[in-house]
Amino acid sequence: MGLVKPASDSFAYTADLTAETVASMLSRLVEIPEGLEIDIAQALKMQLTRSARRFLDLLPEDWEERITSRGNLKQQLSIVMVMLLTVDGDLQLSVKVLEETLQRCVTEGLTRCELALHNSRRKAKLELGADAEGLPTGTLVIGRSRLPIHPSTMGLVPPD
C-alpha cells in the first residue's frame, strides 16, 4: 500500500506533463509561418489540422480531452461539442440544426423545411404540424421514410 499512493501521484504528474507537451506540439504544428500566400497558408493549415485531429482520434477519449483542454487547442483545431439525436439506425441530427430549422420554419411561416443530417450527405425534411390537443408535432422525412419526432424532443428545442 505504501507504493500505491506515490505511484499514482507520479502517474498524474507524468500524465499532465505528457498532455501538456503533446498539446504544445500540436499547437505549434497548426501555426502557419508568416510570408506564405493566403491560399497556400489556408491549405496547409487545413491539412495540418486534419493530421492533428486524426492523431487525436487514435487516442482514448479521456486522453484526447486531457490534451485538447490545454490552452486554446480546441479552438485551433476547430473542435466543437455537438449534441446529436439518433433518428434512424446510424442517421443522426444535430440538436442545434433541428432548433435552427424549427425557428426558420416558424419565422417564415412554413410547415416544411429542409435540413442536413450530421456527417451525411443525405438531406431530410422537417414537417411541422399539431396534434389533436394543439401541441406542436414534427416529422422527419428522409427519402421514403417518415420518422415522427418524439413530443419530448419537440419540447426540448422550442422555436422561441
Image (cartoon, grey):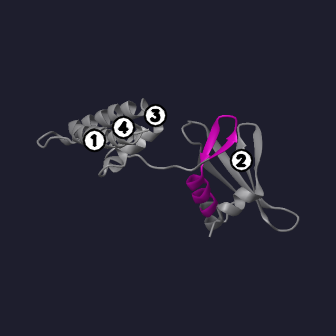
Q: Distance between the residues labelled 3 and 2?
A: 34 Å
Q: Residue furthest front?
A: 2
Task: Mark 3 or mark 2: name the one nearer the start of the chain.
Answer: 3
Task: Tell me the amino acid under the disc marked 4.
Answer: Ala
Q: Which percent across, then down, holds residue 142?
A: 70, 40
Residue 144: x and y, percent?
A: 75, 37
Q: Which residue is drawn at 56% across and 42% down?
A: 118
Q: Which amino acid lies under the numbered mark 2 shown in the image of this protein?
A: Leu
User: Which secondary structure, mark 4?
Assistant: helix
Q: Residue 140 carries which label?
A: 2
Q: Nearer the viewer, residue 70 or 18?
A: 18
Identify residue for label 4: 7
Q: Nearer the viewer, mark 4 or mark 1?
A: 4
- Label 2, label 4: how many angstroms apart (C-alpha)? 53 Å
Q: In which quarter of the image is the N terminus?
A: top left
Instruction: Please name the residue that numbered disc 1 is placed on.
Output: 17
Mark 4 and mark 1: span between their CA atoms? Answer: 15 Å
Tell me the crowding category of disc 2: few under 14, some 14 to 19, or many 20 or more residues within 10 angstroms, Cα based. many
Q: Does the magenta stretch include residue 90?
A: yes
- Label located before the other in sequence (2 or 4): 4
Q: Earlier in the sequence, mark 1 or mark 2?
A: 1
Residue at the right extreme, as displayed = 132
The residue under the point 21% across, 40% down is 28
Q: Decide: marks 1, 3 in contact (CB < 8 A)?
A: no
Front position in the image: 147 or 110: 147
For image coordinates 64% across by 66% down, the residue present is 159
Q: Which mark is residue 60?
A: 3
Residue at image position (14%, 39%) is: 36
State left or right for residue 64 relative to residue 143: left
Circle 1 residues within 10 Å: few <14, some 14–19, many ≥20:
few
